[in-house]
Amino acid sequence: MFSCVICEKEWCYVSSFCPSCRIIKNIGNSYGFEEIRMVLEKVCLRNKIQRDYKINKQLKNELIEKTKALKTENNEID
């Protein structure tokens, strides 16, 4: 009995890959593992610029919500 060499979570009896990771391996064999890595990095990972943009966007949205809430409170008081 072996641990899957990709995910290291599933146990395999006959091969080195669990059924899910076998699909990933077959895709890598078809398209090339370098291509798969590049797609994963572009789609799944964020770089510093993307992280900063997301943080700034979230902070801007929070500021807009707080401003709306304050305006609503001021209108209710008047």
Image (cartoon, rainbow, N blue to C red):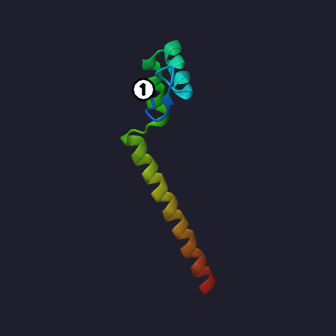
Up-down relation of residue 11 to residue 51 (above or below)? above
- Farthest residue in the bottom direction? 78
Please tell me which residue is depicted at 43% across the width and 53% down the height of the picture. Answer: 56
Up-down relation of residue 19 to residue 61 (above or below)? above
Q: Position of residue 33 (x, y in %)?
A: 44, 18
Q: Position of residue 3 (x, y in %)?
A: 44, 29
- Farthest residue in the left direction? 48
Instruction: Report which residue position mark 1 lands on.
Output: 5
**Mark 1: few/some/many CA within 10 Å (<14, 14-19, 20+):** some
Residue 78 seen in this snapshot: no
Please tell me which residue is depicted at 46% across the width and 22% down the height of the picture. Answer: 16
Residue toward you, 1 or 4: 1
> Please, what secondary structure does the residue beneath circle 1 have?
loop
In the rendered picture of this protein, how many numbered marks are placed on residues? 1
Residue toward you, 71 or 7: 7
Q: Residue 19, located in which quarter of the rendered image?
A: top right
Please tell me which residue is depicted at 43% across the width and 39% down the height of the picture. Answer: 46
Up-down relation of residue 70 to residue 19 (above or below)? below
Tag 1: residue type? Val
Residue 71 seen in this snapshot: yes
Residue toward you, 17 or 73: 17
Please tell me which residue is depicted at 54% across the width and 75% down the height of the picture. Answer: 70
Quarter of the image with the C terminus is bottom right
Q: Where is residue 60 in the image (x, y as percent from the top left)?
A: 48, 58
